[in-house]
Image: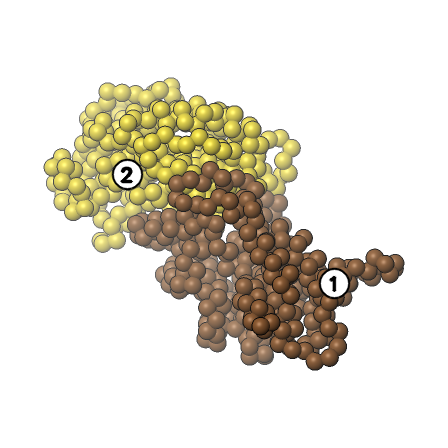
Chain colours: A yellow, B brown
Protein backbone atom coordinates (compact mmCIF):
# COMPACT_ATOMS: atom_id res chain seq x y z
CA UNK A 1 0.00 0.00 0.00
CA UNK A 2 1.16 3.46 -0.79
CA UNK A 3 2.72 5.11 2.18
CA UNK A 4 2.12 8.76 2.86
CA UNK A 5 2.82 10.62 6.01
CA UNK A 6 1.20 13.66 7.64
CA UNK A 7 3.12 15.53 10.17
CA UNK A 8 2.95 18.95 11.66
CA UNK A 9 6.04 20.44 13.17
CA UNK A 10 5.70 23.41 15.43
CA UNK A 11 8.93 24.99 16.44
CA UNK A 12 8.64 26.65 19.80
CA UNK A 13 11.36 28.26 21.82
CA UNK A 14 10.81 27.00 25.33
CA UNK A 15 11.16 30.48 26.69
CA UNK A 16 8.05 31.41 24.77
CA UNK A 17 5.98 28.50 25.95
CA UNK A 18 3.05 28.97 28.24
CA UNK A 19 3.46 27.68 31.81
CA UNK A 20 1.19 24.71 31.22
CA UNK A 21 3.30 23.61 28.29
CA UNK A 22 6.51 24.10 30.17
CA UNK A 23 5.27 21.90 33.01
CA UNK A 24 4.29 19.14 30.61
CA UNK A 25 7.62 19.26 28.83
CA UNK A 26 10.35 16.95 30.08
CA UNK A 27 13.07 17.53 27.52
CA UNK A 28 16.71 17.15 28.16
CA UNK A 29 17.45 20.13 25.95
CA UNK A 30 16.09 23.47 27.05
CA UNK A 31 16.84 25.14 23.75
CA UNK A 32 14.14 24.01 21.36
CA UNK A 33 11.07 21.86 21.24
CA UNK A 34 9.54 20.52 18.08
CA UNK A 35 5.93 19.44 17.83
CA UNK A 36 5.05 17.07 15.03
CA UNK A 37 1.54 16.03 14.01
CA UNK A 38 1.29 12.66 12.33
CA UNK A 39 -1.65 11.26 10.44
CA UNK A 40 -1.91 7.49 10.32
CA UNK A 41 -4.59 5.83 8.26
CA UNK A 42 -5.41 2.39 6.95
CA UNK A 43 -7.66 2.07 3.95
CA UNK A 44 -8.50 5.72 4.29
CA UNK A 45 -9.63 5.34 7.91
CA UNK A 46 -7.69 6.90 10.81
CA UNK A 47 -5.80 4.39 12.94
CA UNK A 48 -6.27 4.88 16.67
CA UNK A 49 -4.48 3.49 19.71
CA UNK A 50 -0.85 4.03 18.76
CA UNK A 51 1.63 5.06 21.44
CA UNK A 52 4.92 6.93 21.29
CA UNK A 53 6.75 3.61 21.21
CA UNK A 54 5.04 2.74 17.94
CA UNK A 55 6.73 5.66 16.15
CA UNK A 56 10.28 6.37 15.12
CA UNK A 57 11.39 9.85 14.16
CA UNK A 58 14.67 11.01 12.69
CA UNK A 59 15.86 14.58 12.43
CA UNK A 60 18.48 14.87 9.70
CA UNK A 61 18.87 11.10 9.94
CA UNK A 62 19.48 11.21 13.70
CA UNK A 63 16.97 9.23 15.76
CA UNK A 64 15.17 11.33 18.37
CA UNK A 65 13.46 10.54 21.63
CA UNK A 66 9.81 11.37 21.19
CA UNK A 67 6.78 11.84 23.39
CA UNK A 68 3.14 11.68 22.45
CA UNK A 69 1.18 14.79 23.31
CA UNK A 70 -2.39 14.49 24.52
CA UNK A 71 -4.27 16.34 21.80
CA UNK A 72 -7.69 15.97 23.34
CA UNK A 73 -7.19 19.31 25.02
CA UNK A 74 -5.78 20.99 21.94
CA UNK A 75 -8.53 22.64 19.95
CA UNK A 76 -8.27 23.20 16.23
CA UNK A 77 -7.95 26.29 14.10
CA UNK A 78 -9.35 25.47 10.67
CA UNK A 79 -8.81 27.84 7.75
CA UNK A 80 -10.91 27.20 4.67
CA UNK A 81 -9.93 28.85 1.39
CA UNK A 82 -12.72 29.16 -1.15
CA UNK A 83 -10.86 29.72 -4.37
CA UNK A 84 -12.78 31.61 -6.98
CA UNK A 85 -11.99 30.74 -10.51
CA UNK A 86 -12.89 29.77 -13.96
CA UNK A 87 -12.98 26.00 -14.27
CA UNK A 88 -16.40 25.25 -12.86
CA UNK A 89 -19.36 27.56 -12.84
CA UNK A 90 -20.71 28.91 -9.59
CA UNK A 91 -23.72 26.62 -9.45
CA UNK A 92 -21.58 23.54 -9.76
CA UNK A 93 -19.31 24.66 -6.98
CA UNK A 94 -22.11 25.79 -4.73
CA UNK A 95 -23.87 22.47 -5.15
CA UNK A 96 -20.63 20.71 -4.38
CA UNK A 97 -20.07 22.71 -1.24
CA UNK A 98 -23.62 22.21 -0.06
CA UNK A 99 -24.58 23.94 3.12
CA UNK A 100 -21.29 25.23 4.37
CA UNK A 101 -22.66 25.86 7.81
CA UNK A 102 -23.04 22.15 8.28
CA UNK A 103 -19.30 21.78 8.01
CA UNK A 104 -18.77 23.78 11.14
CA UNK A 105 -20.98 21.36 13.03
CA UNK A 106 -18.27 18.78 12.65
CA UNK A 107 -15.97 20.91 14.79
CA UNK A 108 -15.67 20.80 18.57
CA UNK A 109 -17.02 23.60 20.70
CA UNK A 110 -13.56 25.03 21.26
CA UNK A 111 -12.48 24.65 17.64
CA UNK A 112 -12.40 27.73 15.44
CA UNK A 113 -13.18 28.14 11.76
CA UNK A 114 -12.09 30.85 9.36
CA UNK A 115 -13.22 31.23 5.76
CA UNK A 116 -11.05 33.08 3.23
CA UNK A 117 -12.45 34.16 -0.11
CA UNK A 118 -10.03 34.04 -3.04
CA UNK A 119 -11.53 35.79 -6.03
CA UNK A 120 -9.98 38.85 -7.62
CA UNK A 121 -9.67 40.02 -4.03
CA UNK A 122 -8.63 38.05 -1.00
CA UNK A 123 -10.53 38.69 2.19
CA UNK A 124 -11.82 36.96 5.28
CA UNK A 125 -15.36 35.98 4.51
CA UNK A 126 -15.56 34.82 8.09
CA UNK A 127 -12.86 35.53 10.68
CA UNK A 128 -11.39 32.81 12.89
CA UNK A 129 -14.16 32.16 15.38
CA UNK A 130 -15.89 29.39 17.26
CA UNK A 131 -19.22 30.61 15.89
CA UNK A 132 -20.66 29.07 12.74
CA UNK A 133 -19.90 31.09 9.63
CA UNK A 134 -22.69 33.19 8.24
CA UNK A 135 -24.53 31.77 5.34
CA UNK A 136 -24.25 33.93 2.27
CA UNK A 137 -22.89 33.95 -1.22
CA UNK A 138 -20.61 30.97 -1.53
CA UNK A 139 -20.06 31.01 -5.24
CA UNK A 140 -16.49 30.32 -6.22
CA UNK A 141 -16.94 31.28 -9.85
CA UNK A 142 -15.23 34.62 -10.31
CA UNK A 143 -13.59 36.37 -13.20
CA UNK A 144 -10.18 35.94 -11.68
CA UNK A 145 -8.69 34.24 -8.69
CA UNK A 146 -5.95 35.04 -6.21
CA UNK A 147 -5.63 31.50 -4.94
CA UNK A 148 -1.88 31.68 -4.28
CA UNK A 149 -2.14 34.84 -2.20
CA UNK A 150 -5.11 33.40 -0.31
CA UNK A 151 -3.29 30.16 0.45
CA UNK A 152 -0.35 32.15 1.80
CA UNK A 153 -2.75 34.21 3.91
CA UNK A 154 -4.22 30.99 5.27
CA UNK A 155 -1.00 29.18 6.05
CA UNK A 156 0.54 32.24 7.69
CA UNK A 157 -2.21 32.38 10.30
CA UNK A 158 -0.44 32.72 13.68
CA UNK A 159 -2.00 29.87 15.60
CA UNK A 160 -0.80 29.76 19.17
CA UNK A 161 1.03 26.79 20.59
CA UNK A 162 -2.09 25.51 22.33
CA UNK A 163 -3.94 24.92 19.08
CA UNK A 164 -3.41 22.90 15.93
CA UNK A 165 -3.95 24.52 12.54
CA UNK A 166 -5.51 22.87 9.50
CA UNK A 167 -5.88 24.57 6.11
CA UNK A 168 -8.39 23.18 3.62
CA UNK A 169 -8.26 24.99 0.29
CA UNK A 170 -10.68 24.52 -2.62
CA UNK A 171 -9.07 25.39 -5.93
CA UNK A 172 -11.24 26.21 -8.92
CA UNK A 173 -9.00 27.28 -11.73
CA UNK A 174 -5.92 29.04 -12.88
CA UNK A 175 -4.55 31.77 -10.70
CA UNK A 176 -4.96 35.03 -12.54
CA UNK A 177 -4.65 37.69 -9.89
CA UNK A 178 -2.09 36.77 -7.24
CA UNK A 179 1.04 38.71 -6.49
CA UNK A 180 2.70 35.38 -5.66
CA UNK A 181 3.51 32.72 -8.19
CA UNK A 182 2.60 29.19 -7.16
CA UNK A 183 6.31 28.35 -7.28
CA UNK A 184 6.79 30.43 -4.13
CA UNK A 185 4.34 28.42 -2.05
CA UNK A 186 6.38 25.30 -1.24
CA UNK A 187 9.13 27.34 0.44
CA UNK A 188 6.55 29.33 2.40
CA UNK A 189 4.70 26.18 3.40
CA UNK A 190 7.89 24.71 4.83
CA UNK A 191 7.83 27.40 7.47
CA UNK A 192 4.17 27.07 8.32
CA UNK A 193 2.78 25.33 11.38
CA UNK A 194 -0.34 24.38 9.46
CA UNK A 195 -1.17 21.15 7.69
CA UNK A 196 -2.43 22.09 4.23
CA UNK A 197 -4.85 20.07 2.17
CA UNK A 198 -5.91 21.28 -1.26
CA UNK A 199 -8.91 19.96 -3.17
CA UNK A 200 -8.84 20.95 -6.82
CA UNK A 201 -11.20 20.64 -9.73
CA UNK A 202 -9.59 19.15 -12.78
CA UNK A 203 -9.87 21.11 -16.04
CA UNK A 204 -12.87 19.92 -18.03
CA UNK A 205 -12.16 18.39 -21.45
CA UNK A 206 -11.68 20.76 -24.33
CA UNK A 207 -9.55 23.34 -22.58
CA UNK A 208 -6.69 24.72 -24.72
CA UNK A 209 -3.46 22.83 -24.27
CA UNK A 210 -1.63 25.95 -23.11
CA UNK A 211 -4.12 26.34 -20.29
CA UNK A 212 -3.86 22.71 -19.29
CA UNK A 213 -0.07 22.97 -19.19
CA UNK A 214 -0.27 26.08 -17.05
CA UNK A 215 -2.82 24.50 -14.79
CA UNK A 216 -0.68 21.39 -14.37
CA UNK A 217 2.39 23.44 -13.47
CA UNK A 218 0.47 25.43 -10.89
CA UNK A 219 -1.24 22.40 -9.45
CA UNK A 220 2.07 20.58 -9.08
CA UNK A 221 3.60 23.52 -7.20
CA UNK A 222 0.62 23.75 -4.89
CA UNK A 223 0.65 19.99 -4.36
CA UNK A 224 4.30 20.29 -3.38
CA UNK A 225 3.41 23.00 -0.88
CA UNK A 226 0.75 20.79 0.67
CA UNK A 227 3.07 17.80 0.89
CA UNK A 228 5.72 19.92 2.62
CA UNK A 229 3.30 20.41 5.50
CA UNK A 230 2.09 16.84 5.65
CA UNK A 231 -1.04 17.48 3.63
CA UNK A 232 -2.00 16.55 0.12
CA UNK A 233 -3.74 17.66 -3.04
CA UNK A 234 -6.77 15.67 -4.07
CA UNK A 235 -9.18 15.87 -6.97
CA UNK A 236 -12.35 17.58 -5.96
CA UNK A 237 -15.72 16.09 -6.67
CA UNK A 238 -17.81 16.73 -3.59
CA UNK A 239 -16.42 19.56 -1.51
CA UNK A 240 -18.48 18.78 1.56
CA UNK A 241 -17.39 15.15 1.68
CA UNK A 242 -13.81 16.12 0.98
CA UNK A 243 -13.81 18.59 3.85
CA UNK A 244 -15.32 16.00 6.20
CA UNK A 245 -12.71 13.41 5.27
CA UNK A 246 -9.78 15.79 5.70
CA UNK A 247 -11.11 17.09 8.99
CA UNK A 248 -11.67 13.61 10.38
CA UNK A 249 -8.14 12.59 9.45
CA UNK A 250 -6.71 15.66 11.14
CA UNK A 251 -8.84 15.27 14.24
CA UNK A 252 -7.57 11.74 14.63
CA UNK A 253 -3.93 12.47 13.96
CA UNK A 254 -1.15 12.16 16.55
CA UNK A 255 1.07 14.89 17.93
CA UNK A 256 4.67 14.01 18.69
CA UNK A 257 7.10 16.15 20.61
CA UNK A 258 10.85 16.05 20.81
CA UNK A 259 13.88 18.15 21.68
CA UNK A 260 16.41 17.85 18.87
CA UNK A 261 19.57 16.09 20.00
CA UNK A 262 22.73 15.42 18.04
CA UNK A 263 21.90 17.74 15.16
CA UNK A 264 23.05 21.22 14.25
CA UNK A 265 20.59 23.82 15.34
CA UNK A 266 20.65 25.95 12.20
CA UNK A 267 19.30 25.23 8.75
CA UNK A 268 16.77 22.87 7.32
CA UNK A 269 15.96 19.74 9.30
CA UNK A 270 14.61 16.80 7.32
CA UNK A 271 12.16 14.77 9.34
CA UNK A 272 11.19 11.17 8.77
CA UNK A 273 8.43 9.50 10.74
CA UNK A 274 7.71 5.82 10.57
CA UNK A 275 5.61 3.22 12.29
CA UNK A 276 7.98 0.22 12.11
CA UNK A 277 6.47 -3.14 11.33
CA UNK A 278 3.18 -1.69 10.08
CA UNK A 279 3.70 -1.42 6.35
CA UNK A 280 0.01 -1.43 5.62
CA UNK A 281 -0.42 1.92 7.28
CA UNK A 282 -0.55 5.17 5.40
CA UNK A 283 1.44 7.81 7.21
CA UNK A 284 1.49 11.45 6.15
CA UNK A 285 4.24 13.66 7.48
CA UNK A 286 5.71 17.07 7.18
CA UNK A 287 9.03 17.01 5.39
CA UNK A 288 10.94 19.01 7.94
CA UNK A 289 11.39 22.32 9.67
CA UNK A 290 13.66 25.33 9.57
CA UNK A 291 15.97 25.50 12.54
CA UNK A 292 17.28 28.49 14.37
CA UNK A 293 19.68 30.74 12.51
CA UNK A 294 22.17 30.25 15.30
CA UNK A 295 24.62 27.38 14.68
CA UNK B 1 -16.00 72.23 -16.93
CA UNK B 2 -17.82 70.72 -14.02
CA UNK B 3 -19.56 68.14 -16.14
CA UNK B 4 -16.21 66.45 -16.48
CA UNK B 5 -15.71 66.45 -12.73
CA UNK B 6 -19.13 64.97 -12.10
CA UNK B 7 -18.57 62.22 -14.62
CA UNK B 8 -15.24 61.31 -13.13
CA UNK B 9 -16.65 61.27 -9.62
CA UNK B 10 -19.45 58.99 -10.73
CA UNK B 11 -16.96 56.47 -12.02
CA UNK B 12 -15.28 56.49 -8.65
CA UNK B 13 -18.47 55.70 -6.75
CA UNK B 14 -20.24 52.90 -8.57
CA UNK B 15 -23.38 52.11 -6.65
CA UNK B 16 -22.49 48.50 -6.10
CA UNK B 17 -19.32 49.55 -4.29
CA UNK B 18 -20.50 52.35 -2.06
CA UNK B 19 -23.56 50.50 -0.87
CA UNK B 20 -21.45 47.87 0.84
CA UNK B 21 -19.06 49.42 3.27
CA UNK B 22 -16.65 47.03 4.92
CA UNK B 23 -16.83 47.10 8.68
CA UNK B 24 -14.65 44.15 9.46
CA UNK B 25 -17.58 41.83 9.96
CA UNK B 26 -20.30 42.28 7.41
CA UNK B 27 -19.16 41.93 3.85
CA UNK B 28 -22.14 40.00 2.60
CA UNK B 29 -22.66 42.53 -0.14
CA UNK B 30 -19.40 41.72 -1.81
CA UNK B 31 -20.04 39.85 -5.00
CA UNK B 32 -18.34 39.24 -8.26
CA UNK B 33 -19.50 42.41 -9.91
CA UNK B 34 -18.27 44.47 -6.98
CA UNK B 35 -14.86 42.88 -7.13
CA UNK B 36 -14.78 43.48 -10.81
CA UNK B 37 -15.66 47.11 -10.24
CA UNK B 38 -12.92 47.61 -7.70
CA UNK B 39 -10.27 46.26 -9.95
CA UNK B 40 -11.60 47.73 -13.16
CA UNK B 41 -13.08 51.08 -12.32
CA UNK B 42 -11.52 52.72 -15.29
CA UNK B 43 -12.69 49.97 -17.61
CA UNK B 44 -16.18 50.75 -16.41
CA UNK B 45 -15.73 54.46 -16.68
CA UNK B 46 -14.48 54.96 -20.21
CA UNK B 47 -17.98 54.82 -21.65
CA UNK B 48 -18.99 57.79 -19.53
CA UNK B 49 -15.68 59.63 -19.50
CA UNK B 50 -14.86 59.58 -23.17
CA UNK B 51 -18.10 61.09 -24.59
CA UNK B 52 -18.04 63.91 -22.04
CA UNK B 53 -14.42 64.76 -22.75
CA UNK B 54 -15.08 64.59 -26.48
CA UNK B 55 -18.12 66.83 -26.17
CA UNK B 56 -16.31 69.33 -23.95
CA UNK B 57 -13.32 69.40 -26.30
CA UNK B 58 -15.55 70.75 -29.05
CA UNK B 59 -16.77 73.49 -26.72
CA UNK B 60 -13.24 74.69 -25.92
CA UNK B 61 -11.87 77.81 -27.65
CA UNK B 62 -10.24 77.11 -30.99
CA UNK B 63 -8.14 80.28 -31.01
CA UNK B 64 -7.06 83.20 -28.87
CA UNK B 65 -4.97 83.24 -25.71
CA UNK B 66 -5.01 80.27 -23.35
CA UNK B 67 -5.84 81.10 -19.75
CA UNK B 68 -5.12 79.05 -16.64
CA UNK B 69 -8.60 77.59 -16.59
CA UNK B 70 -8.32 76.21 -20.09
CA UNK B 71 -4.84 74.93 -19.38
CA UNK B 72 -6.13 73.14 -16.29
CA UNK B 73 -9.01 71.67 -18.27
CA UNK B 74 -6.73 70.20 -20.93
CA UNK B 75 -4.54 68.57 -18.33
CA UNK B 76 -7.47 67.16 -16.34
CA UNK B 77 -9.28 65.86 -19.42
CA UNK B 78 -6.19 64.10 -20.72
CA UNK B 79 -5.53 62.61 -17.32
CA UNK B 80 -9.09 61.32 -17.21
CA UNK B 81 -8.70 59.57 -20.54
CA UNK B 82 -5.42 58.09 -19.29
CA UNK B 83 -7.13 56.96 -16.11
CA UNK B 84 -9.84 55.34 -18.21
CA UNK B 85 -7.17 53.89 -20.50
CA UNK B 86 -8.85 55.22 -23.65
CA UNK B 87 -5.52 55.31 -25.42
CA UNK B 88 -6.95 55.44 -28.93
CA UNK B 89 -8.86 58.59 -28.07
CA UNK B 90 -5.61 60.22 -26.95
CA UNK B 91 -3.55 59.19 -29.94
CA UNK B 92 -6.24 59.28 -32.62
CA UNK B 93 -5.47 57.67 -35.95
CA UNK B 94 -8.87 56.29 -36.82
CA UNK B 95 -9.92 56.79 -40.44
CA UNK B 96 -12.10 59.84 -40.97
CA UNK B 97 -15.63 58.83 -42.00
CA UNK B 98 -16.75 60.03 -45.38
CA UNK B 99 -20.17 61.22 -44.28
CA UNK B 100 -19.78 64.63 -42.62
CA UNK B 101 -22.86 64.19 -40.46
CA UNK B 102 -21.34 61.28 -38.54
CA UNK B 103 -18.29 63.31 -37.59
CA UNK B 104 -19.42 63.52 -33.99
CA UNK B 105 -17.25 64.85 -31.17
CA UNK B 106 -16.31 61.29 -30.28
CA UNK B 107 -15.30 60.45 -33.83
CA UNK B 108 -13.36 63.71 -33.99
CA UNK B 109 -11.32 62.60 -31.02
CA UNK B 110 -10.72 59.16 -32.43
CA UNK B 111 -9.55 60.61 -35.72
CA UNK B 112 -7.43 63.52 -34.49
CA UNK B 113 -6.50 62.40 -31.01
CA UNK B 114 -7.21 64.45 -27.91
CA UNK B 115 -3.50 65.12 -27.38
CA UNK B 116 -3.29 66.75 -30.78
CA UNK B 117 -6.21 69.01 -29.92
CA UNK B 118 -4.46 69.98 -26.71
CA UNK B 119 -1.19 70.60 -28.49
CA UNK B 120 -2.87 72.94 -30.97
CA UNK B 121 -3.76 75.14 -28.02
CA UNK B 122 -0.89 74.60 -25.58
CA UNK B 123 2.08 73.94 -27.81
CA UNK B 124 4.69 71.25 -27.19
CA UNK B 125 4.69 71.29 -23.38
CA UNK B 126 6.55 68.47 -21.60
CA UNK B 127 3.58 66.86 -19.89
CA UNK B 128 1.82 66.59 -23.25
CA UNK B 129 4.84 64.84 -24.74
CA UNK B 130 4.72 62.41 -21.84
CA UNK B 131 0.98 61.85 -22.27
CA UNK B 132 1.48 61.13 -25.94
CA UNK B 133 4.30 58.67 -25.24
CA UNK B 134 2.28 56.89 -22.57
CA UNK B 135 -0.75 56.66 -24.84
CA UNK B 136 1.28 55.32 -27.75
CA UNK B 137 3.04 52.63 -25.72
CA UNK B 138 0.80 51.44 -22.92
CA UNK B 139 -1.87 49.74 -24.99
CA UNK B 140 0.50 47.54 -27.02
CA UNK B 141 2.58 46.77 -23.94
CA UNK B 142 -0.41 45.64 -21.92
CA UNK B 143 -1.70 43.60 -24.82
CA UNK B 144 1.58 41.78 -25.29
CA UNK B 145 1.86 41.25 -21.53
CA UNK B 146 -1.26 39.12 -21.63
CA UNK B 147 -0.22 36.46 -24.05
CA UNK B 148 -1.05 33.72 -21.60
CA UNK B 149 -4.80 33.24 -21.84
CA UNK B 150 -5.44 32.98 -18.13
CA UNK B 151 -3.32 35.86 -16.90
CA UNK B 152 -5.74 38.71 -16.93
CA UNK B 153 -4.49 41.02 -14.20
CA UNK B 154 -2.47 43.94 -15.53
CA UNK B 155 -1.67 45.18 -12.03
CA UNK B 156 0.51 42.21 -11.14
CA UNK B 157 4.24 42.16 -11.72
CA UNK B 158 5.12 38.93 -13.40
CA UNK B 159 8.03 37.54 -15.29
CA UNK B 160 6.65 38.01 -18.77
CA UNK B 161 9.78 36.67 -20.30
CA UNK B 162 11.03 38.37 -23.40
CA UNK B 163 7.75 38.23 -25.23
CA UNK B 164 7.03 40.87 -27.83
CA UNK B 165 10.44 42.56 -27.70
CA UNK B 166 9.30 44.78 -30.57
CA UNK B 167 6.74 46.52 -28.40
CA UNK B 168 9.24 46.94 -25.58
CA UNK B 169 11.99 48.28 -27.83
CA UNK B 170 9.58 50.65 -29.52
CA UNK B 171 8.52 52.00 -26.14
CA UNK B 172 12.15 52.49 -25.13
CA UNK B 173 12.76 54.47 -28.31
CA UNK B 174 9.77 56.65 -27.60
CA UNK B 175 10.59 57.32 -23.96
CA UNK B 176 14.35 57.72 -24.09
CA UNK B 177 14.46 61.15 -25.83
CA UNK B 178 12.13 62.55 -23.16
CA UNK B 179 14.72 61.94 -20.45
CA UNK B 180 16.41 65.16 -21.51
CA UNK B 181 13.43 67.09 -20.21
CA UNK B 182 14.23 67.81 -16.55
CA UNK B 183 10.63 67.72 -15.33
CA UNK B 184 10.11 64.32 -16.96
CA UNK B 185 13.45 62.71 -16.21
CA UNK B 186 12.48 60.82 -13.05
CA UNK B 187 9.29 59.37 -14.49
CA UNK B 188 11.08 58.41 -17.68
CA UNK B 189 13.65 56.55 -15.61
CA UNK B 190 10.90 54.68 -13.79
CA UNK B 191 9.29 53.76 -17.09
CA UNK B 192 12.57 52.72 -18.71
CA UNK B 193 13.35 50.65 -15.64
CA UNK B 194 9.99 48.96 -15.90
CA UNK B 195 10.73 48.13 -19.54
CA UNK B 196 14.12 46.73 -18.55
CA UNK B 197 12.33 44.40 -16.14
CA UNK B 198 10.45 42.99 -19.10
CA UNK B 199 13.79 42.44 -20.84
CA UNK B 200 15.27 40.68 -17.79
CA UNK B 201 17.89 43.41 -17.52
CA UNK B 202 17.70 43.60 -13.75
CA UNK B 203 20.87 45.62 -13.17
CA UNK B 204 19.94 48.17 -15.83
CA UNK B 205 16.50 48.49 -14.32
CA UNK B 206 17.96 49.09 -10.87
CA UNK B 207 20.14 51.87 -12.26
CA UNK B 208 17.07 53.57 -13.68
CA UNK B 209 15.21 53.29 -10.39
CA UNK B 210 18.18 54.63 -8.43
CA UNK B 211 18.44 57.57 -10.80
CA UNK B 212 14.74 58.26 -10.45
CA UNK B 213 15.05 58.33 -6.67
CA UNK B 214 17.95 60.75 -6.95
CA UNK B 215 16.11 63.16 -9.18
CA UNK B 216 12.61 63.45 -7.76
CA UNK B 217 10.70 64.23 -4.61
CA UNK B 218 7.43 63.06 -6.12
CA UNK B 219 6.08 60.62 -3.55
CA UNK B 220 4.41 58.39 -6.11
CA UNK B 221 7.47 58.13 -8.32
CA UNK B 222 9.63 57.34 -5.31
CA UNK B 223 7.23 54.59 -4.25
CA UNK B 224 6.90 53.18 -7.76
CA UNK B 225 10.66 53.09 -8.26
CA UNK B 226 11.14 51.37 -4.90
CA UNK B 227 8.38 48.85 -5.58
CA UNK B 228 9.81 47.96 -8.98
CA UNK B 229 13.33 47.90 -7.56
CA UNK B 230 12.14 45.45 -4.90
CA UNK B 231 10.86 43.18 -7.61
CA UNK B 232 14.14 43.42 -9.50
CA UNK B 233 16.05 42.53 -6.33
CA UNK B 234 13.79 39.53 -5.88
CA UNK B 235 14.71 38.28 -9.33
CA UNK B 236 18.36 38.65 -8.34
CA UNK B 237 17.69 36.75 -5.08
CA UNK B 238 18.81 39.79 -3.09
CA UNK B 239 16.11 39.40 -0.50
CA UNK B 240 17.47 41.91 2.01
CA UNK B 241 17.63 44.61 -0.65
CA UNK B 242 14.16 43.69 -1.85
CA UNK B 243 12.78 43.98 1.67
CA UNK B 244 14.41 47.37 2.13
CA UNK B 245 13.02 48.64 -1.18
CA UNK B 246 9.53 47.34 -0.45
CA UNK B 247 9.60 48.94 2.99
CA UNK B 248 10.47 52.29 1.43
CA UNK B 249 7.63 51.94 -1.07
CA UNK B 250 5.30 51.06 1.75
CA UNK B 251 5.74 54.44 3.41
CA UNK B 252 3.80 55.89 0.48
CA UNK B 253 1.47 52.96 -0.15
CA UNK B 254 1.06 51.23 3.23
CA UNK B 255 -1.91 49.10 2.19
CA UNK B 256 -1.05 48.34 -1.44
CA UNK B 257 -1.94 44.68 -1.76
CA UNK B 258 0.61 43.29 -4.15
CA UNK B 259 3.41 45.21 -2.48
CA UNK B 260 2.46 43.93 0.96
CA UNK B 261 1.93 40.36 -0.21
CA UNK B 262 5.40 40.27 -1.74
CA UNK B 263 7.03 41.92 1.27
CA UNK B 264 5.16 39.64 3.61
CA UNK B 265 6.28 36.55 1.72
CA UNK B 266 9.90 37.64 1.95
CA UNK B 267 9.63 38.29 5.69
CA UNK B 268 7.87 34.97 6.22
CA UNK B 269 10.61 33.19 4.33
CA UNK B 270 13.14 34.76 6.65
CA UNK B 271 11.34 33.54 9.72
CA UNK B 272 9.62 36.80 10.73
CA UNK B 273 6.23 35.17 10.77
CA UNK B 274 4.60 37.64 13.12
CA UNK B 275 5.68 40.67 11.15
CA UNK B 276 4.77 39.02 7.88
CA UNK B 277 1.26 38.16 8.97
CA UNK B 278 0.64 41.61 10.44
CA UNK B 279 1.48 43.28 7.13
CA UNK B 280 -0.59 40.86 5.12
CA UNK B 281 -3.60 40.99 7.39
CA UNK B 282 -3.63 44.77 7.50
CA UNK B 283 -3.40 45.12 3.73
CA UNK B 284 -6.08 42.52 3.01
CA UNK B 285 -8.52 44.16 5.38
CA UNK B 286 -8.57 47.41 3.42
CA UNK B 287 -11.66 47.23 1.24
CA UNK B 288 -11.89 48.50 -1.36
CA UNK B 289 -8.17 48.22 -1.88
CA UNK B 290 -6.17 51.14 -3.20
CA UNK B 291 -5.18 51.07 -6.84
CA UNK B 292 -1.95 49.20 -7.33
CA UNK B 293 1.23 51.20 -7.90
CA UNK B 294 1.79 49.49 -11.22
CA UNK B 295 -1.72 50.32 -12.38
CA UNK B 296 -1.19 53.93 -11.40
CA UNK B 297 2.07 54.09 -13.31
CA UNK B 298 0.43 52.65 -16.40
CA UNK B 299 -2.23 55.33 -16.29
CA UNK B 300 0.19 58.23 -16.59
CA UNK B 301 -1.24 61.44 -15.15
CA UNK B 302 -4.44 59.52 -14.48
CA UNK B 303 -3.07 59.04 -10.98
CA UNK B 304 -3.30 62.80 -10.48
CA UNK B 305 -6.90 63.28 -11.55
CA UNK B 306 -8.14 64.42 -8.11
CA UNK B 307 -5.43 67.09 -7.92
CA UNK B 308 -5.97 68.17 -11.50
CA UNK B 309 -9.70 68.51 -10.95
CA UNK B 310 -8.99 70.53 -7.82
CA UNK B 311 -6.72 72.77 -9.85
CA UNK B 312 -9.40 73.14 -12.48
CA UNK B 313 -11.89 74.10 -9.81
CA UNK B 314 -9.45 76.60 -8.33
CA UNK B 315 -8.84 78.37 -11.63
CA UNK B 316 -12.57 78.77 -12.22
CA UNK B 317 -13.05 80.83 -9.07
In the image, residue B136 above or below residue B177 = above
Tell me which chain the residue with mark 1 is part of. Answer: B
Q: Is residue A155 above or below residue A197?
A: below
> What kind of element bears circle 1?
helix
Residue A93 shows up from this direction:
yes
**Where is B127 relative to B137, above or below?**
below
Residue under the point 23% across and 39% down: A161
Q: Position of residue B93 (x, y in %)?
A: 76, 63
Residue A9 marker: 2
Q: Quadrant of the C terminus of chain B?
A: bottom right
Along the horizontal axis of the image, is B221 left or right of B59?
left
Q: Residue at x 65, y 57 (%)?
A: B49
- The numbered mark at residue B221 is none
Which is more toward the observer, B56 or B138? B56
Q: Is residue B78 left or right of residue A245?
A: right
Most foreground residue, B272 or A81: A81
Q: Based on the displayed image, in which of its 4 quarters is residue A109 positioned?
A: top left
Q: Chain of mark 2?
A: A
Secondary element at tag 2: strand
Residue B37 in the image, given as x and y percentages of width and height: 56, 47
Q: Quadrant of the N terminus of chain B?
A: bottom right
Residue at figure coordinates x 47%, y 25% from the top left? A98
Q: Nearer the viewer, residue B135 or A265?
A: B135
Q: Which residue is mark 1?
A: B109
Q: Residues within 10 Å of mark 2 (few under 14, many from 20)?
A: many
For the question of whether residue B168 can be seen, the reply is: no
Residue B184 picture location, percent across and down: 56, 74
Q: Is residue A163 above or below residue B38?
A: above
Determine the residue located farthest toward the front in the rendered image: B317
Amino acid sequence: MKITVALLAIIVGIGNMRPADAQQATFTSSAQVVFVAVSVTSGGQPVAGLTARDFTLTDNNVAQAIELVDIDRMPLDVSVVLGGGNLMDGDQVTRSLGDFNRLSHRLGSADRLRVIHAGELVFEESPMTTAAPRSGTRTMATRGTSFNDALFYALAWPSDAQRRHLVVAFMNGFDTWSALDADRLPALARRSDAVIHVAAFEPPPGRPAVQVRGWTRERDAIASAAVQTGGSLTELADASQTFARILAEFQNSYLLRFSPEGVARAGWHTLTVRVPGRRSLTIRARKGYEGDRRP
Amino acid sequence: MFAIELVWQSTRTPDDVVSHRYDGEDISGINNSTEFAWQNLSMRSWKSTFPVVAWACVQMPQSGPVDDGERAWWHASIAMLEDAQVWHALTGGERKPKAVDVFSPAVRELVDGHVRHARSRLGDVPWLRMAEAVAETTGPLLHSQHESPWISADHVLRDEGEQHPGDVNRAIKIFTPLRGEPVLAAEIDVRLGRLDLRRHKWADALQHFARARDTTRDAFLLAASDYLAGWAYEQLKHDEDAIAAYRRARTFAPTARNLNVRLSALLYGQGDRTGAYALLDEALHVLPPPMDLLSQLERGDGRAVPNLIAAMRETSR
